[in-house]
Image (cartoon, grey):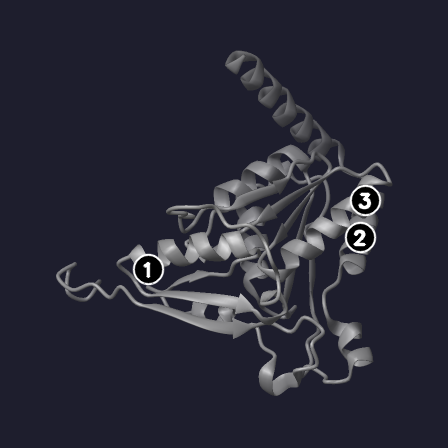
Amino acid sequence: RYMTGGQVSLPLVMRGASGFGSLGFGSQHGQSAENWAMCVPGLKIVSPSTPAEMAGLLAAAIRDADPVLVFEHKALYGAKQTVPDGEHLVPLGTARVVREGSDVTLVGLSITVRHCEQAADTLAAEGIDAHVLDLRSLVPLDAQAVLASVARTGRLVVVEENPGQLGWGAAVASIVAEEAFDDLVAPITRVTGGNIPWPVARELEAEVDVSPERVVAAVRNLMKREPSTRAVGALRRSRSQEGVQHADQR
């Protein structure tokens, strides 16, 4: 479509299994290949976290004029959920707020959204209020949703299965570092898979896979850090402005 000036479109949807999920697939059958696809301009990339999200994203992908890659995590194939009746569309490029919070932002995709939710439950019992965001789509990426959340919480933890040396989480962290540095009261933290060929043995896989426990540990370490005076002032101003906006809306 780009090379023909819009004269030719390519409404193509490609579905594929991805992810590890402690299922024992090993390196030959366990990859998160969405990072590779992100390197190809023109491709749109989505990865659902629930059956309802799958139905809505797939319906939107079928209606899109560009090629859309749908990465489906193998560990979610057995998930069950009531899907809305009738036409159910989830617009590409729109993140979903899974849980509201004010202390830390947890950003996940596909299976890691579940990890973030479980971690948020544990953290809530400790008095830590986590905001959970499901990206849904990597291309286009809803960067504004991430930036808006970080402006409220001042802390960001990105959770992905990919090896930590690269990954979509690195791209999200880069955007926040460039565009919302003054909103941060602590360094951006990433929880990722290991930088090794993926093992088959369940015990070894558990050592390198992402889990709710690893997310909780990352947040605990983040909350222990003493924020700078500059960062605290910026966060207070952001929350004050948000309060004024809510008052105006009422």
- Numbered circle sitting on residue 123: 3
Q: Residue type at mark 2: give it.
A: Val
Q: Between residues 17 and 126, which one lies in front from this camera angle?
A: 17
Q: Is residue 224 left or right of residue 159?
A: right
Of mark 1 and mark 3, the one earlier in the sequence is: 1
Q: Residue type at mark 3: give it.
A: Leu
* Label 2 SS: helix
Residue 9: image quadrant is: bottom left
Question: Residue 136 appears at what percent x and percent y?
Answer: 51, 53
Identify the residue shown where x is 72% and y is 84%. Answer: 199
Establish if 141 lies above or below 69: above
What whole-number distance in Å separates the C-alpha atoms at marks 1 and 2? 37 Å
Disc 1 versus disc 3: nearer the observer: 1
Establish if 136 lies above or below 73: above
- Numbered circle sitting on residue 118: none
Question: Residue 236 appears at what percent x and percent y?
Answer: 68, 25
Of mark 1 and mark 2, the one earlier in the sequence is: 1
Name the quadrant of the C terminus: top right
- Numbered circle sitting on residue 216: 2
Establish if 19 lies above or below 5: below
Identify the residue shown where x is 44% and y is 52%. Answer: 56
Residue 210: image quadrant is: bottom right
* Label 3 SS: helix
Tell me the residue that label 1 is attached to. Answer: 62
Q: Between residues 152 and 127, which one lies in front from this camera angle?
A: 127
Of mark 2 and mark 3, the one earlier in the sequence is: 3
Establish if 149 lies above or below 214: above
- Do the numbered discs 2 and 3 sit on residues whose CB atoms are within 8 Å? yes
Identify the residue shown where x is 78% and y is 49%. Answer: 219
- Do the numbered discs 1 and 3 sit on residues whose CB atoms are within 8 Å? no
What whole-number distance in Å separates the C-alpha atoms at marks 1 and 3? 38 Å
